[in-house]
Image (tube, rainbow, N blue to C red):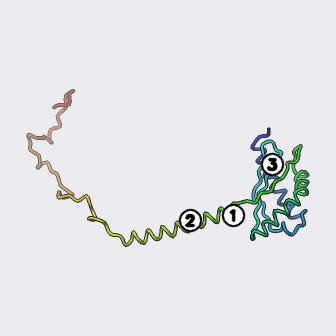
Amino acid sequence: MADPARAAKLAQRIKVVVAEALGRKVKDPRLEGITVTDARVTNDLQHATVYYTVFGDQAVQADAAKGLEKAKGVLRQEVGRNITVRLTPSLEFVADQIPVVASNLEELLREAKKRDAEVAALAAKAQHAGDADPYKSDVAAEVDIDEDDFDEEDLDLSDDGELDEDGHK
């Protein structure tokens, strides 16, 4: 079993080789709009999955899938020439769903932004259900306490006497 780091490095190399081969070696017009987005190789280096995107409608995407299946042998031969492993991995082509997921995510973000704007508009017009400050009290907020407010016998503020071990003066 190979090292996962080696498998990742090999996958990147396969991605580059397949993308270059699609541009140079394969002369199928169905494959002109293909972009290779990613490649994954199993840890035993025997199977490679190549992810691709094609912009267009369903018919264009179906034609691209058929073209890749037809060109799979040529692409595998090109991969075998350009990588340094004992056995050339088999290739599997999978249409990448990232653009579809990204467009769905963008739509959800647009919807959330619209709802946030509606909530902000409602909040701007809103009024408090009760008083603006529900924690009001009858006592004045700032009360100044001076030494004159205390009786000498209650608390002696001027005496800095020492405390005994029980905390008494």
**Horizontal and vertical percent for residue 46?**
83, 45
**Horizontal and vertical percent for residue 28?**
88, 67
Q: Amino acid at mark 3?
A: Leu
Q: Amino acid at mark 1?
A: Pro
The local secondary structure at tag 3 comes to helix
Q: Residues within 10 Å of mark 2 (few under 14, many from 20)?
A: few
**Horizontal and vertical percent for residue 116?**
48, 67
Task: Give the number of callouts.
Answer: 3
Earlier in the chain: of badge 1 and badge 3, it is 3
To which residue does mark 1 refer? 99
Residue 16 quadrant: bottom right
To which residue does mark 2 refer? 109
Instruction: State the residue in front, 156 or 119.
Output: 119
Residue at the top extreme, as displayed: 165
Q: Residue at x 91, y 57 (%)?
A: 74
Q: Residue at x 39, y 69 (%)?
A: 123
Residue 37 relative to residue 111: left or right: right
To which residue does mark 3 refer? 10
Q: CA distance from mark 2 to mark 1?
A: 15 Å
The local secondary structure at tag 1 comes to helix
**Horizontal and vertical percent for residue 86?**
89, 43
Residue 95 quadrant: bottom right
Q: Residue at x 31, y 66 (%)?
A: 128
